[in-house]
């Protein structure tokens, strides 16, 4: 018979840490800790696949009910208590746990098993009726919200009224009698909202909670998180039923969350928070601002010493930074969870490199520890140190970086404003998982409550967002959509600036400055003064040792080329010559060429552009000395260089000696119904060969001038938008003719190659014909995606998000390479091209070249290089290393 339920307790478990796909992360790690001898309350886990079966069939299999009943009996034996026993009741927690960590995105119910009879048994067993009724009201509130669908804020309103009537500030100050009354009020609320009494049968309660946890896999916040983190919807969640231990039994009890290293900086120091006389949700939800874990040494010294020993054991066992949840019940420590801790990019890089130095992991493992996309965080700006500004409040620095934006006070408004292009900062008393979509949309989050392990802090760190939490000086007025900090009122729409490194909050839009890594790259900060850069440089060195896929950059100016090289680019994979024409006086000469009435006029205008292009190319060859530079000939349609009315048209007509109607006639004659499929790319060079001649001459003369100065030049000329080999041959012949003239005229030899950009399906399907004369292929995946899907990338944003939301597309194909469609065309083209020219060099130069999953695909199909924007070069380098390493470590 297939087993769906796995028990752990009394130092022995039926699972291990390697069973995450079956048990989920929480269940697998509870089993592993049990086997290690770590103090874990006994319990059992329902396998993840049962969740998917339940969501499909909407019924609980009878065999599963029997398995749960059998394991519940084992749990009673292990705990010495009985489920539903009025004298000595067993209470359990019911918690989710997916194979991939999804913190806070699914449901949890604590204190399950309490009813009007067992609450008195708990009071006698614990010696505290107040504790028993506090636990009972918590259970009714959680169960009523999660399982029965009673709105959470209605319970909070009753609780707030009870505090107000009692004249106290915190829940812990309410008396036993007041809590008894609150329990009755909660039960009346449930009856009124659902039309039925609160369930008193513990078995009914248990199955209601289990099914609610399964259903929480389909909650919007869970779906949003999976989409953001690229987690499959088919995994499902495990359900963990664990014997309750209580941190709210008095001053010798407590609960907390801790990390074996600092998740923000990576410092090797035990880091976390705890609360005395509290249950776990009080810490994570940010309802009370907790104490530093260091203070636990004074309040609960014995448990603290055991916790220090245990966290060290867990880090060494898992060989990674751990995020642990614990409870102390009357001085005795219990571990409720351990998992790989979420961390910032700076922390991830530091932890990975230092663990190699500590001989805990190998350098290959360090490379794999840092998600490639996360490196983007290391480039986040900080507040310009030269700015003099006075902070209006200071909170806890939960996630670094500087962010500015307009204040908004709910998640939906954050999404709306961000969709309109606004930079927003989400301001809340505390965030909950229901705010996740707002956190995705916002640049940063600011909360008045919560600690460094609260929901806002953990989620922001995982997403690389700036966060300041627990800002006690801030009073949030949601009704009037404003907040006040030390007498300063910030209304919705007012600008704020947050410093996630210091926790300071500033009014207004303060200027920012580049991060430490970027400052070193730009040469404005010495490496010796930049420890974050040193760790980054070490990690990237290890990545470069193992990757086989080269990484180039898309760069159009010498400055961009220098930045790209400093980031580790091994050449330029795309230099877009048209970008050079928009600078200064060049646009006028370009427009003069476009409006010319004949070839002679065009050539006169092109002669003005020639020295400008030559100087640009010479600067780029200088910056990339010894590395290849791929220069794409003019690609966009000519109308993009012309104004379309207004004062600029009037000024241009005057400059070119034309009347307004004459200029308008030229503009109208160039207008196309679908310009992206119109007169552009190689079609321009065929119609106006003098354009190709000028650009070729500028490239060859620049290369030879640089070579005369001792620069090792490696020019590669790329002909764009080829659909037929005859188009390529036409343009290649022009370039070769110009090259021969320049080489003879300057008396120097020059090695160069001529290739093409594959960005049309026909070119991919006839690549063998093109490769007879093309020496390299570079896939322009932006246009290849457009022409394969029949989608305009400029217009598809209106409906593509809906496609992704509804699961029609797994990802936006302009962000993540479509491997089954566009990828198939690339594979066909590579195979066809290399069948004719075995040593054909092949790469991609769309922005997919900096997207980790797309980079791995390029590695898998044997491309030679990817090319991306300069600031994504480190991401591509690390993703290429992951692609090389992952097959060997599976």
Image: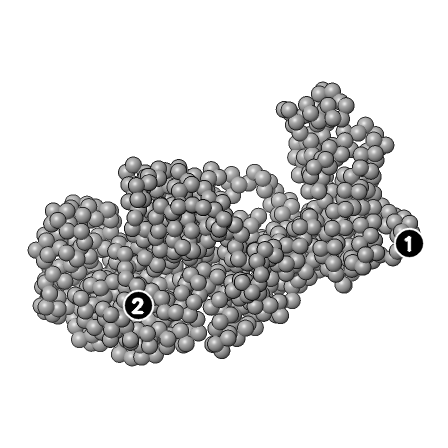
Q: Mark 1 sits on what residue?
A: 747
User: Horizontal and vertical percent for residue 365?
Assistant: 52, 71
- Please rate how many residues cluster around mark 2, counting C-alpha atoms within 10 Å: few if below 14, some from 14 to 19, many from 20: some
Q: Is residue 361 visible?
A: no
What residue sits 35% from the left and 55% below the top? 396
Q: Check the picture and name the quadrant holding the N terminus.
A: bottom left
User: Horizontal and vertical percent for residue 286?
Assistant: 29, 55
Viewer-nearest residue: 167 or 488:
488
Viewer-nearest residue: 890 or 648:
648
The CA distance from mark 1 to mark 2 is: 75 Å
Could you say which quadrant of the image residue 294 lies in? Answer: bottom left
Viewer-nearest residue: 241 or 366:
366
Q: Secondary structure at mark 2?
A: helix
Q: Is residue 478 depicted above or below 752 in this figure?
A: above
What residue sits 46% from the left and 44% below the top? 510
Left or right of 552, for residue 685: right
Q: Secondary structure at mark 1?
A: loop
């Amino acid at each position: 018979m297939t087993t769906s339920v796995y028990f752990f307790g009394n130092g022995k478990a039926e699972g291990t840490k390697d069973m995450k796909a079956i048990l989920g992360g929480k269940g697998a790690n509870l089993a592993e800790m049990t086997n290690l001898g770590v103090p874990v309350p006994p319990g059992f886990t329902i396998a993840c696949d049962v969740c998917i079966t339940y969501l499909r069939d909407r019924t609980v299999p009878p065999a599963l009910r029997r398995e749960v009943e059998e394991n519940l009996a084992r749990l009673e034996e292990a705990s010495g208590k009985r489920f539903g026993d009025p004298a000595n009741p067993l209470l359990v927690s019911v918690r989710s746990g997916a194979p991939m960590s999804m913190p806070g995105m699914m449901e949890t119910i604590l204190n399950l098993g309490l009813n009007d009879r067992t609450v008195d048994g708990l009071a006698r067993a614990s010696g505290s009726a107040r504790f028993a009724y506090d636990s009972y009201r918590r259970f009714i509130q959680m169960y009523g919200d999660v399982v029965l669908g009673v709105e959470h804020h209605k319970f909070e309103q009753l609780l707030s009224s009870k505090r107000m009537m009692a004249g106290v500030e915190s829940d812990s100050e309410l008396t036993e009698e007041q809590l008894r009354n609150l329990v009755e009020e909660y039960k009346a609320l449930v009856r009124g909202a659902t039309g039925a009494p609160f369930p008193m049968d513990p078995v009914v309660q248990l199955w209601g909670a289990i099914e609610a946890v399964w259903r929480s896999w389909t909650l919007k916040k869970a779906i949003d998180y999976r989409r953001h983190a690229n987690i499959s919807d088919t995994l499902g969640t495990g359900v963990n039923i664990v014997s309750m231990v209580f941190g709210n039994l008095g001053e010798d009890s407590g609960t907390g969350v801790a990390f074996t290293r600092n998740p923000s900086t990576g410092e090797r120091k035990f880091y976390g928070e705890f609360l005395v006389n509290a249950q776990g949700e009080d810490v994570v939800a940010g309802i009370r601002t907790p104490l530093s874990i260091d203070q636990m040494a004074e309040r609960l010294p014995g448990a603290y010493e055991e916790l220090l020993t245990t966290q060290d054991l867990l880090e060494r066992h898992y060989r990674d930074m751990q995020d642990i949840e614990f409870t102390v019940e009357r001085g005795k420590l219990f571990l409720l969870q351990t998992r790989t801790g979420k961390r910032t990019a700076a922390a991830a890089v530091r932890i990975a490199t230092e663990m190699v130095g500590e001989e805990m992991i190998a350098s290959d493992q360090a490379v794999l520890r840092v998600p490639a996309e996360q490196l983007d965080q290391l480039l986040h700006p900080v507040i310009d140190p030269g700015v003099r500004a006075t902070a209006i409040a200071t909170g806890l620095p939960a996630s670094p970086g500087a962010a500015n934006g307009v204040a908004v006070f709910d998640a939906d408004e954050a999404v709306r404003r961000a969709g309109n292009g606004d930079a927003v900062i989400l301001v809340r008393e505390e965030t909950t998982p229901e705010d996740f979509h707002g956190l995705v949309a916002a640049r940063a989050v600011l909360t008045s409550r919560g600690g460094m392990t609260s929901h806002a802090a953990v989620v922001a760190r995982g997403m690389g967002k700036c966060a300041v939490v627990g800002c006690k000086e801030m009073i949030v007025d949601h009704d009037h959509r404003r907040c006040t900090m030390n007498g300063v009122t910030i209304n919705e729409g007012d600008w704020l600036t947050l410093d996630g490194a210091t926790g300071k909050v500033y009014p207004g839009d303060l200027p920012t400055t580049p991060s430490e890594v970027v400052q070193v790259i730009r040469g404005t900060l010495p490496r010796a003064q930049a420890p974050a850069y040193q760790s980054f440089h070490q990690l990237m060195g290890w990545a470069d040792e193992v990757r086989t896929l080269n990484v180039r950059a898309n760069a159009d100016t010498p400055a961009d080329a220098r930045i790209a090289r400093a980031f580790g680019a091994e050449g330029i994979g795309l230099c877009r010559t048209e970008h050079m024409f928009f600078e200064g006086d060049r646009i006028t000469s370009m427009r003069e060429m476009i409006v010319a009435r004949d070839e002679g006029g065009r050539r006169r205008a092109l002669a003005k552009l020639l020295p400008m292009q030559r100087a640009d190319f010479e600067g780029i060859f200088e910056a990339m000395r010894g590395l290849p530079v791929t220069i794409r000939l003019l690609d966009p349609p000519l109308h993009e260089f012309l104004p379309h009315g207004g004062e600029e048209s009037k000024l241009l007509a005057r400059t070119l000696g034309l009347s307004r109607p004459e200029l308008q006639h030229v503009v109208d004659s160039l207008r196309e119904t679908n310009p992206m499929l119109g007169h552009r790319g190689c079609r321009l060079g065929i119609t106006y060969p003098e354009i190709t001649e000028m650009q070729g001459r500028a490239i060859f003369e620049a290369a030879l001038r640089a070579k005369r100065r001792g620069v090792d030049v490696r020019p590669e000329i790329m002909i764009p938008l080829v659909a037929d080999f005859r188009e390529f041959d036409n343009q290649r012949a022009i370039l070769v003719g110009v090259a021969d003239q320049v080489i003879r005229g300057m008396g120097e030899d020059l090695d160069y190659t001529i290739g093409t950009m594959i960005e049309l399906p026909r070119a991919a399907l006839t690549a063998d014909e093109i490769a007879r004369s093309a020496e390299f292929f570079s896939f322009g995946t932006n246009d290849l995606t457009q022409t394969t899907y029949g989608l305009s990338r400029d217009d598809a944003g209106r409906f593509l998000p809906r496609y992704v939301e509804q699961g029609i597309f797994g990802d936006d194909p302009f962000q993540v390479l479509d491997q089954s469609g566009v990828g198939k065309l690339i594979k066909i083209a590579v195979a066809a091209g290399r069948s004719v020219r075995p040593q054909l060099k092949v790469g991609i130069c769309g922005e997919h070249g900096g997207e980790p999953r797309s980079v791995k695909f390029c590695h898998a199909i044997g491309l030679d290089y990817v090319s991306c924007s300069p600031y994504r070069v480190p991401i591509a380098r690390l993703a290429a290393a992951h692609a090389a390493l992952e097959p060997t470590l599976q």
